[in-house]
Amino acid sequence: MLLADVVTTSAAVAGTRSRLAKVKALAGLLAQAGPGAIEPAVAFLAGAPRQGRTGAGWRTLYDLAATPSDVPELTVERTDSILEELSRTSGKGSAQKRVDLLTELFTAATQQEQDFLRRLMTGELRQGALEGVMLDAIASAAEVPGEAVRRAFMLCGRLTVTAVAALTGGEQELKGFKLEVGRPVRPMLASPAESLESALAELGEYIVEYKMDGARIQVHKDGDDVHVYTRTLREITESVPELVDLVRGLLCRTVVLDGETLALTDDGKPRPFQETMSRFGATSQRELLLRPYFFDCLHLDGVDLLDTPLRERNEALHKAVGEHVIPGGRTDAEQILADSLEAGHEGVMVKALDSLYAAGRRGKSWQKVKPEHTLDLVVLAAEWGHGRRTGYLSNLHLGARDPDGGPPIMVGKTFKGMTDELLAWQTKALQEIQSQAGDWVVHVRPEFVVEIELDGAQVSTRYPGGVALRFARVVRYRPDKDPAEADTIDAVRALLPGKGGI
């Protein structure tokens, strides 16, 4: 398959807001892909090389002296092969070797292909082929049920692997994906509730649990072999030996657990979220210990529980982890909420007892109740500050996720809620991912998610989404989330007066 076909499809997807049109364009391309082109083509269209980081920096790519080809002859397979070699290049002489490989690749590419490759390799390719859109396109191209594709993706966690299975083996191949102890599955997500009362009324039989200000973890145990993953499925086993030791000591042979972990003060109160997250980037144990609280059990001693209702999974959970179950109960919801807030946590989760584990989805069967309303938004740019903030990037431009796969939609700005420490970190971090810089504003690649507390939303013609945040302030950055997990423009619009908002 020619890379030019991928570039053309990428432009078509970027040029429309229609989800159906995006799916049709992507499916048309995937249906023509040979076995060797499927995986890299899906990766390219999803916005990143199959290899992830290739070691080629922004400056190297944009300073590269490579005369473009006049004829589109570069294939997807050759492009992927060079990127693979590039990602494996290290050691003495690696800098020159990278330049040589990049020159070979870019000389074989047309002008349009060079532009595509630069944006692909620097994370600036935002043509709208987000997860949900790509999954629908894979199903359409392979002529298989969308649910079969989504379930396979849930269990393997990789778009490229899911696409290869669907397009080469059809529904039968997709059915071969099973829950595998040691391989993380995508976590189930919750939706915000209007109030505790509305959540209880909507969900029928329920369980109410503390909503903690910690970090999501997924733990897999097979005998003495234990693995710990973040919500983005990144393995952090070596950084959290105290969690590994605790899980290794559980009285079960195999188990897959979903939960939360956080650092506590001496009096049992939660420490700031940033202190918990600091452990996830460490390469060895630190003095700050993490405490796990588990709230779901997806597998226990040879029995998969994904397709069983929460009431049964909850029984298995208590059997597996005992005292390490997250606090909560099936009665006295208001008291549980009050106790959670008194203990320093965010609120509560209300979950339907008949709900199945819908990995990767933000459904209504799990609802989060918090007294202060927050949104997770994407940082699009920042303005240089004035007065005491001179020299710091201060006023953030905030975007909500487009549910149809387009780029984030700007919904407001804020400079409130930032400490001096956060301003210093933010100034350095945002400049490292800048895509365009002017005299007073620095535009950045949409990589950072920030949690914003707000008083509501209002209709506005100032921003393209037709809505603006009211009295927004920064709570914290969310390094445990990526832009695909940010709140959508629909979630912002739901906060408008008369829409059930704050």
Image: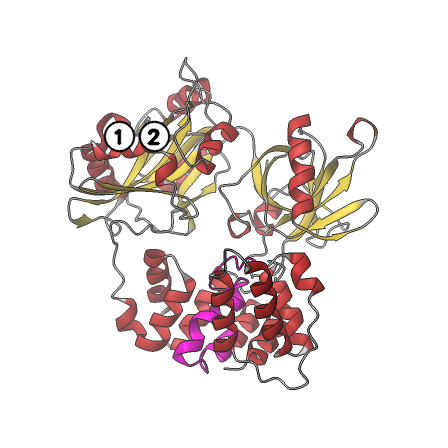
Reading the image, the residue beneath label 2 is 292
Marks counted in the figure total 2
Is 365 part of what is drawn in magenta? no
Q: What residue type is labelled 1?
A: Leu
Q: Is residue 452 above or below residue 287?
A: below
Q: Along the horizontal axis of the image, is 461 left or right of 277?
A: right
Residue 274 coordinates in the image, percent (x, y): 52, 30
Q: Which of marks 1 and 2 is in front?
A: 1
| Magenta residues, start to end | 26-55
Q: Along the horizontal axis of the image, is 103 left or right of 244?
A: right
Q: Which residue is drawn at 34% across and 58% down?
A: 156
Q: Would residue 41 be seen by someone viewing this image from the given angle?
A: no
Q: Is mark 1 on a helix, strand or loop?
A: helix
Question: Which of the 4 image quadrants contains residue 342?
Answer: top left
Q: Is residue 401 above or below residue 350?
A: below
Residue closest to the eye, 163 or 341: 163
The answer to whether mark 1 and mark 2 are in CB contact below 8 A is yes
Residue closest to the eye, 150 or 355: 150
User: Crowdedness of circle 1 by 10 Å Cα count: few (<14), some, many (20+)?
Assistant: some
Reading the image, the residue beneath label 1 is 246
Q: What residue type is labelled 2?
A: Pro
Residue 84 coordinates in the image, percent (x, y): 47, 66
Residue furthest toward the front? Answer: 92
Residue furthest toward the top? Answer: 267
Is 31 part of what is drawn in magenta? yes
